[in-house]
Amino acid sequence: MNRIIRKYTIIQHNEIKDELIRSINGIIDNDPNAVYAKMSHSDYDLDYQSNYKDVVRNVLTPYLKHYAKSWHFDSINFKNIWFASYRDGATFGWHSHEGCNMSGVYMLKLPDPKSATQLWGTDFNEEIFEGDLLVFPSMLPHRSPVINNEEKIVIAFNWDIYSCDM
């Protein structure tokens, strides 16, 4: 049986990590008020295109297509992509996403696996590390625990799977 929640380890993580963090830091430097909810920084509400989003789309697409294919779907579509950085008591409480059927979180910088995105009401118990991608249905409640003495950076996104080939 297929698992509806999947973890993928991004093979290219070490190659793209520094470039993505530089791009994100550039956004923060240019717009220090780029904040959403109780995160330290995020471009969730900013309306512009950034190079890091193109890198993320290119690197993550094969993993998302693999997931979709496991359910006999042959098409995917990114809806939106954003980064979220957490430190100094930042958090994001239980929530779900609307306007899509799937969500994903790429752990770009994750000093401690205990700081990873948490999923509510599931038996998913795999440890999540830096460089991992977590994909799950968008209605599944999830959260970031409080991050205090470290910095966590994730790239989150909403996406759809469609066009069943059965």
Image: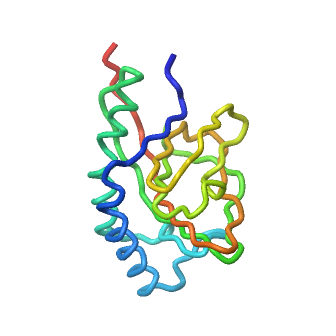
Above or below, 18 relative to 76:
below
Foreground: 107 or 96? 107
Q: Quadrant of residue 126?
A: top right
Question: Which residue is at 57% across, 72% downward?
Answer: 151
* Residue 33 image offset from top left, x and y in percent: 54, 83
* Residue 159 image offset from top left, x and y in percent: 42, 44
Total number of numbered discs in the rendering = 0
Where does the C terminus fall, quadrant-wise?
Answer: top left
Above or below, 62 relative to 36:
above
Q: Quadrant of residue 49?
A: bottom left
Above or below, 110 relative to 125:
below
Question: Which residue is at 29% across, 40% downward?
Answer: 62
Question: Which residue is at 37% across, 39% downward?
Answer: 64
Question: Which residue is at 34% across, 32% downward?
Answer: 66
Above or below, 32 relative to 19:
below
* Residue 100 image offset from top left, x and y in percent: 48, 42
* Residue 146 image offset from top left, x and y in percent: 71, 65
Foreground: 162 or 114? 114
**In the rendered view, does 4 fall on the left or right side of 74?**
right
Colouring convention used in this rendered image of the protein: rainbow
